[in-house]
Structures are given as structure tokens and as C-alpha cells.
Image: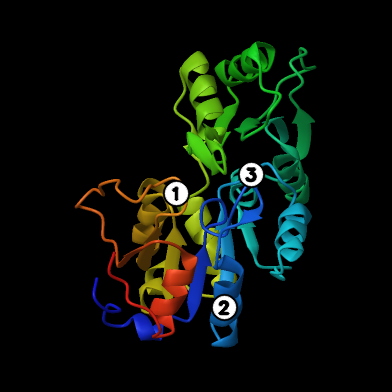
């Protein structure tokens, strides 16, 4: 693109992915911290919308603070969206990290951690997210619970996530294993699905269908961030600093309003100080 698309100067809220946009394994991407500060100084609100379900909310906020980005109250994770797919008082088998346990308990449900050992009694739902202790025994317990009638809820379907040394398996890979072993199609909460859209819209204070006028989603994955922008009806900025490399082709059916190197380039476009041409 040669310039900012019509209406981009009306963007009031920037929905910003974390992994591959702000940082790689908590190492800030060049220019990202200054870009966030500049966007906030312009009066725009930033929400960090991440499919990372592993970390506690306070850990997300602390990690952002460590790189110079205050973020208390500004982080929205897929574990938070997944928790709204269970009801208060339900018994939930968590096949995921501490962020999922936190969200389920905040919802008022009982979180039963999947350790791979047999569990006592049935559960109402199995919530699956990224965790680094997943093994055959945890898979067996999760799949058995689903086959016995528990709902299968996934925090997200991201098969990988970016790090400075390359891509690692993501929560979607674990969810795919449980879905395959149980024979049940999961309900998915995170980007690009409706539960996350509803949660973000409620925090912004707008109905999802009104987001087009004032919101921009910035992400490194067209298949999640781009489709999430489509679901919200808002604009999409693709950055090539994470899972999508500089030469990767993009599905022509997906609207991409900005296709730039990184978050610093997005900020330059919105603030009128950068050429957006690749």
C-alpha cells in the first residue's frame, strides 16, 4: 500500500496480538515498545488480545511491564474467553496451563487439573490449552472424559507459536490430539472465534458489529488475527515479524488493510509518519 486506507485516521482502538507482534518469547521486537507508547500518546486505546492461554493475567501484565509497557487491565487472553464457555459451579478438567485454571476459577467453576492420573467422578467440560507437560496419559484422561459426555472446549487452534529460534507447537496441536482421540469436534474460544469477539467487544464497550468504524486488529497470523478482524468487522494490519514471514503469500479472499514489516510500521501509518509499501 502506498498510503493509509480511507478511514484509518478514525481508528481509536488498536487490538494488538502479543507473540510475533510485540515480542518473541518475551524479547521485544525492535520498535514495538516505542510504537505502543506513540499510539497511546495519540489518544488511542490499546488492548493486547492474545491466544496465549498458558500464563496468568498478572504474568502477561508483568512481562509487558518488564519491557516498558504498562498493561494492567489491558490484556485479553483466550483462557478468559474459554472460561465463559463453562458455567459457575461446573466441574472442569483443565488440560492446560495456570492461565486456564485461573480463568475457570474466576468464572466460579471448579478446576480439576489433568495430571494424567485417573480422576474421581465425571466432569462437565474439558478445557484444553497450551501446557508443556502434555503426554500420553493426560491425553487419555482428557479424551476419556469427553467420550463420557464432557464438552470439549479449546482455548485456541494455533498449531504453533513463534519464538526467536523458530516455531514451537502451540495449544492447537494439543487440542487436535484430544479431538482426534475423543472423536469430538471442540468448541473454540480464542481468536478468530465468537467468544473472544464478544469478550473484546464488551471490554471496548461496543457491539461487535460497530467495531468497523474505530478498531484495528494487528497480528502476525492471517488465519487467526485476520479472520478475527473479519469477525469483528474491523480493519486488519498484518505484520511480518512473527509466524508469517516476509515472502509468505496471503489468501486473496482475506482483506488486509495494511501489510507491513512490524508494529512500528503500523504506528507510523496510523500516525502519518511512514510509507506502508513493502
Tag 1 residue: 193
Say whether marks 1 and 2 touch (CB < 8 Å). no
Give the residue drawn at x 48%, y 58%: 197
Tag 2 residue: 45
**Left or right of residue 134, residue 220 in this image:** left
Q: CA distance from mark 1 to mark 2?
A: 22 Å
Residue 56, percent across and down?
75, 49
Closer to the camera in the image, 106 or 277: 277
Residue 23, percent across and down?
59, 55
Foreground: disc 1 or disc 3: 3
Residue 53 tag number: 3
Question: Of label 1 and label 2, which has the lower sequence position?
Answer: 2
Q: CA distance from mark 3 to mark 2?
A: 23 Å
Describe the element under mark 2 as helix, strand or loop.
Answer: strand
Quarter of the N terminus within the rendering? bottom left
**Rendered view: 17 above or below 94:** below
Residue count near mark 2 (Cα–Cα under 10 Å), binned few <14, some 14–19, many ≥20 = some
Question: Of label 1 and label 3, which has the lower sequence position?
Answer: 3
Amino acid at each position: 500500500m502506498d498510503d493509509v486506507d480511507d478511514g484509518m485516521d478514525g481508528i481509536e482502538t488498536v487490538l494488538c496480538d502479543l507473540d510475533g507482534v510485540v515480542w518473541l518469547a518475551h524479547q521485544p521486537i525492535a520498535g514495538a515498545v516505542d510504537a505502543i507508547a506513540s499510539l497511546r500518546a495519540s489518544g488511542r486505546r490499546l488492548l493486547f488480545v492474545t491466544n496465549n492461554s498458558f500464563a496468568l493475567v498478572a504474568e502477561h501484565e508483568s512481562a509487558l511491564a518488564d519491557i516498558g509497557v504498562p498493561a494492567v487491565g489491558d490484556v485479553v487472553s483466550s483462557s478468559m474467553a474459554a472460561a465463559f464457555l463453562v458455567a459457575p459451579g461446573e466441574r472442569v478438567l483443565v488440560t492446560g496451563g495456570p492461565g486456564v485454571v485461573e480463568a475457570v476459577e474466576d468464572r466460579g467453576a471448579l478446576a480439576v487439573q489433568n495430571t494424567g492420573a485417573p480422576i474421581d467422578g465425571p466432569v462437565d467440560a474439558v478445557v484444553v490449552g497450551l501446557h508443556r507437560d502434555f503426554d500420553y496419559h493426560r491425553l487419555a484422561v482428557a479424551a476419556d472424559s469427553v467420550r463420557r459426555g464432557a464438552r470439549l472446549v479449546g482455548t485456541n487452534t494455533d498449531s504453533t507459536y513463534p519464538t526467536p529460534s523458530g516455531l514451537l507447537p502451540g495449544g492447537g496441536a494439543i487440542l487436535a490430539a484430544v479431538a482426534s482421540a475423543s472423536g469430538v469436534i471442540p468448541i473454540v474460544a480464542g481468536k478468530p472465534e465468537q467468544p473472544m469477539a464478544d469478550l473484546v467487544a464488551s471490554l471496548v464497550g461496543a457491539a461487535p458489529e460497530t467495531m468497523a468504524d474505530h478498531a484495528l486488529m494487528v497480528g502476525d497470523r492471517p488465519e487467526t488475527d485476520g479472520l478475527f478482524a473479519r469477525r469483528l468487522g474491523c480493519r486488519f494490519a498484518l505484520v511480518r515479524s512473527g509466524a508469517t514471514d516476509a515472502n509468505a503469500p496471503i489468501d486473496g479472499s482475506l482483506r488486509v488493510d495494511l501489510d507491513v514489516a512490524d508494529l512500528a510500521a503500523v504506528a507510523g501509518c496510523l500516525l502519518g509518519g511512514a510509507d506502508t509499501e513493502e
